[in-house]
Amino acid sequence: MLQEEQLPIDRELGGAVLALLPSQWDAASLRAERQPGTDSSESYVLSIEPLAVGSGTVVPDEEVQLAVRKLFLLHRRYTTGLRSACYVFRRKPDGRWAFTADFQYDEE
């Protein structure tokens, strides 16, 4: 089932993003958008930005890129038409992090 297979990818992605964030950031977003290529190839436009305290951007590293690729490949296998994903990470008062995700799909 898609949700069961996606959960470990979400956790991997979250861990990879959080490892890159500057300590002063309390909230950040990761945006990933699929860019169709020729034949079966595709690429992804990624950005990590602060949402509250903090400035600048963080460059997604190889771990983030790999987890994003896994996410899109999983959705391709289930033919969902995933076009983009936006993960929002927020630090809770106890110092732990929580995330939400929003997904956009191709129009049919």
Image: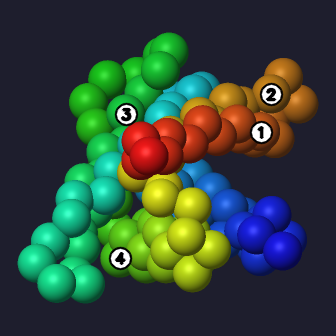
**Neighbourhood count class around disc 1 (C-alpha, 10 Å): few under 14, some 14–19, many 20 upward:** few
Instruction: Please give the residue where the numbered disc 3 appears in the rendered image.
Output: 49
Instruction: Please give the residue where the numbered disc 4 appears in the rendered image.
Output: 62
Instruction: Please give the residue where the numbered disc 1 appears in the rendered image.
Output: 98
Q: CA distance from mark 2 to mark 4?
A: 27 Å
Instruction: Please give the residue where the numbered disc 2 appears in the rendered image.
Output: 92
User: Which residue is depicted at the point 60% across and 37% down?
Assistant: 102
- Mark 2 touching mark 1, by CB under 8 A? yes
Farthest residue toward the left?
38
Residue 29 in percent (x, y) is at 48, 35
Residue 3 in percent (x, y) is at 80, 64
Residue 35 in percent (x, y) is at 22, 59
Q: Amino acid at mark 1?
A: Ala
State whether residue 29 is above or below residue 7.
above
Q: CA distance from mark 2 to mark 1?
A: 7 Å
User: Which residue is depicted at the point 50% across and 74% down?
Assistant: 76
SS at badge 2: loop
